[in-house]
Structures are given as C-alpha cells and as structure tokens.
Image: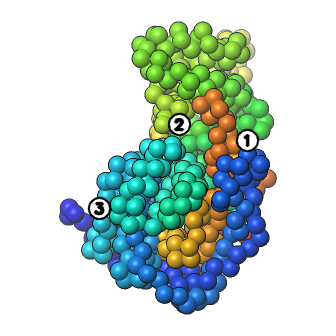
Amino acid sequence: MNQISPLQQARYDYQPKLPPVFLECGPFAAARSGEETCSVSDQKQIKALFPDTYGLPAVTFVRRSVFDCPPIKAGVILSGGQAPGGHNVIAGLFDGLKALNPDSELFGFLGGPSGLIDNKYIMLNEGLVDQYRNTGGFDMICSGRTKLEKDEQFAQVARNCAQHGIKAIVIIGGDDSNTNACALAQYMLSHQTGVQVIGCPKTIDGDLKNAWIEVSFGFDTATKVYSELIGNIMRDANSARKYWHFIKLMGRSASHIALECALQTHPNICLISEEVEKKGMSLDQIVDEMTALVVSRADRKMKYGVVLIPEGLIEFIPESKVLIAELNDFIGKDKETFDGLTSDGKMEYVVKRLSQASLKAFESMPLMIRKQLLADRDPHGNVQVSRIETEKMLAMLIEERLAGINGIRAENNKKAQNESGKEKPVEFSAQTHFFGYEGRCAAPSNFDADYCYSLGYTAAALIGAGKTGFMASVRYLSCPAAEWEAGGIPLTMMMNMEHRHGKDVPVIKKALVELSGKPFQAFAEHRQAWGVGTEYVYPGPIQYFGPSAVCDQTTVTLRLEQA
C-alpha cells in the first residue's frame, strides 16, 4: 500500500468487539432455531420461486457447540455501492473461518459479482487482510454492480466453485445484491452443488432493515460524516447570515439518511419523502411551504437557513412518481433503441409515449430536470436519482416565487402612505450541495467497525453450522457489544414481488421511513422550532478515541427505535 496516515496506522491496532457468544466459544456456536418464517408478502409466489429455502426458521447462536470442522474453502464478494466497514466484514469472515479450521481458505473475487462469474480472484491471507482492518473503502477486492440473476451465470459460478473446491460464498451487499444471493442459494440447492450462500446487510441508505436486521452497515458512519459537514455549513450560515444552503443527501429511495442527519443537526427544513407521498404533496405545495419559511425568516432579518433534501424526493412527489414509473417501464422495455437516440430524439420518443397527466408533469419541469430524467439508467433500468439536481430545482423555484412576492411588495410600497407601511424585499441567495460519495468510504466509526466484524464472524459461524440462503444478523445494537446477539435469518423472509422492467420479480423489500415510528415522531415534534429559530447542532468529526459516550454511540435513529 501507499504511505498511510497516523490515524490509519492507529486504526490497524483497534480490536473490534464481538457478541459474547463468540467471545466464549468462537465460531463453534450452537444455532437455536425459532419458528418457521414467511416472506413479508406474496407468500405463495415467493415460496414457488424459492422452494428449498422458503419457510426456514431464523437462528440464534446461543452456546458452545463441539464439532470437528474440516478446512473450508469459501469465496467472498463486495457488491454494489461502497459502505464504511466492508473490509471489517471480510476480516471477521477470515478470522472466523480460520478459527473453525486454520487450514481454511478465503477467495476474494474481484470487482463484485462479475469476478465471481469470470473467475477473477485473489487469495486472502493474514498479511493482506491485516492491511485493511478498520479501514474504509472496498479497495481490497473492489466492488461491482453486475446483476447475478440468470441461470447461465449461476451455472458458471457453480463451475468456478467446483474448480476450486469452494463450498461457501458470502455476498456482502444491499437489497438487490442479497436478492441475487437468495436466487443463487436456491440454484445451488436445486442443483445439489453443495455450495452454501450467505448474505451480509450493506447499504448506507438504511433501507435494508427489519426486526432481525436492525441497521445495515455503513449507515452509522456515513450519517456521522454527513452530519459533520452539515454542522460545518450551519456554522458558516450562522456566521455569514446571508445564504440559504440546500443540501441533497444520498439515499436512493428511503429518507433514513436525511432524517438521521436532521436529528443530529436540527436544520431549518428537512423534507421527508415518505411524508410527501403520504400527504400527496405536489411540487408546488412543497415550494410554497418552503418559500413561506424563507419569507418569515427574512422578515425577521434572518436571511439564511439550511435545508436537507433526500436524494429520492422526486420519486415520491405524486405527479413525478407516476411520470418516473412510466419512463422506467417503457424505456426499460426498449432500452437499446432509446440509448441510440440523440438528446432531442429522446425527448420526442418520450413525449409520444407518456400519458396526458405525466406529459403535463414532464413539460412543467425545468429543461435541466427533464434532461436528467432521460439520462443513462442504472443497471436495474431505473432513473439515477442521484443525477437529478433536486436541490438546484427547489432553490430555483423558490427564487421564482420570491421574485413574484417582491414584485407584489414593490407595487404595495408604491401605494403605502408612509414608510411604516412599506415592506422590504425578501433577500435570498442560495448555495447548493450534494453529500454522497463523501460518506461512502470513510474510515468506519467504532460502531461500524465492531458491527461489521461481528457480521463477518457471524457469516463464518453460519457456514460452520451448515446454513445456506441466510443473512447474517446481529441484534440489540443500541446496547453495548457485550449484549449483542448473533444469528441469521432466511433471505426469503425479506422478499416480496415488485414490478420492474415491465414484469413482476422477487426482490427484498425496501424499508422506508415509518411516519409512526419514534425517529420521525421526534423530528416532527421539534421541526417547527428548528424552522423559525437557529437551533443548530455541530456534531464535529467522528471520534475514534476517548470516552465511550463520544466514541461508541449509535445513531439517534437506532437509540429512539430501541428506547
């Protein structure tokens, strides 16, 4: 590796904490089975698609189990976008496999699922793994977004595993990646390959969660990084007192990141996509409410503020949601033709195919946004919401509203009989930001370092216990690690059917912000005061050394959910 920083050197020496069952007996833990499980919905369809893994009971590791474990050859991939702590999942997996049998081997497939298909790998050894302990990024073996979903891909993976004698594959990824893991597990079982498949829950978006998966790894670190940056901007806003800062935050669909950062920093405005959808708020309504607060603050000589905007907001505004669904549907069905068109050709193609209501919504948007809606799709055929500059659109629309308000005030001032009856023009100057990649590869917080290492170690224990089609689970995360509980849940338990690319497909259901949940309720209770005042909180950078209250605290979301 290149020259490393003093902090990175110090982090190498950090020893992640583990759930107590593993401190007692390592990965030689007995798995206690619970009740049979079922998918979150569409039970009949999911069971038909995954007959060999559907209904399996969740398991919890509870005590020492005595068994001789032969050497295990396992493979691991990182799939999808980066999230802080991925290297520690690999380190925990490596250490757990070596604890099961010192002769175990771990293949690191390069570039995500494509490496697994193309048989591109490196052997992970202690020297290499040690260089990446407690570090950010995915650069040990890199990641990729190749969809692992076709039988011919599964067959090639099976052949590669047979060539190397690999008996287990661990897929570290988000909802789509673990959907692929579920399908791969079913294939390996139905074809009697003897290859186990285990998933680990990764995504900074926070939308891979349920009763057993309390948080996806990376969410803690990413939201702390973003909150530090937001706090810095708040301090600047409160110092200069002349700018409104519009900050879009990563989070493909759910607003968990925006909500958590709001709870940490107390912005003047934070939009929650799920609330916008529930209330059926149009774009005009959103802009009107935001403009009203800008005017109110300006009239009290507060010409500044901070706005948090979730990345996926545009998909939750009713008229935009229908529009985007139509675009995704017919562009997904005819992607090759669409991709070959010029910019003007794409506009013409879309105008001819949209419904009347969606066409009206499309043509009401600024040209900049229309072009972004037609830009390159993601691997799943969906609009890339990170490229939709919602923050600039909102700032621009508010500026237009204020121009109208100032025009009315100017007319009223002409009619005013004296100076006391005159209204001052609303001064407004906007700065826009997008915080996304800044948080994805940060050095993991102590929480994420511990959690990720525990997930990797749990994956090794699941392999040792002979499980397949499971996701590693570590629970009671708002408590100290000495109270954490390790186990696993069947991937089918999180599945439902969704309409994609013009057809119904099985996918892990996204967990959106629950408006009845304690985190949103805490935000809703305080947001009016945050809006009219200046109650900013400045979290500062992640602390790796010092009092536990400073270094090891979990997210506000998790603390409220488990209070």
List the residue tagged with mark 1.
275
Q: Residue at x 31, y 58 (%)?
A: 121
Answer left or right for 25 relative to 418.
Answer: left
Residue 118 versus residue 471 in the image, above or below: above
| Residue type at tag 3 | Ile
Answer left or right for 476 relative to 109.
Answer: right
Question: Which of pointers 3 and 2 lies earlier in the amino acid sequence?
Answer: 3
Q: Secondary structure at mark 2?
A: loop
Q: Is residue 547 visible?
A: no
List the residue tagged with mark 2.
380
Residue 342 versus residue 331 in the image, above or below: above
Q: CA distance from mark 3 to mark 2?
A: 28 Å
List the residue tagged with mark 3.
122
| Residue type at tag 1 | Glu
| Residue type at tag 2 | His
Quarter of the figure with the N terminus:
bottom left
Question: Which of pointers 1 and 2 lies earlier in the amino acid sequence?
Answer: 1
Q: CA distance from mark 1 to mark 2?
A: 26 Å
Q: Position of residue 224 (x, y in %)?
A: 51, 59
Q: Position of residue 239 (x, y in %)?
A: 48, 47
**3 vs 1, front mark:** 3
Neighbourhood count class around disc 1 (C-alpha, 10 Å): few under 14, some 14–19, many 20 upward: some
User: Do residues under tags 1 and 2 come within 8 Å of each other at their CB atoms?
Assistant: no
Question: Residue at the front extreme?
Answer: 192
Camera-nearest residue between 549 and 121: 121
Label for residue 357? none
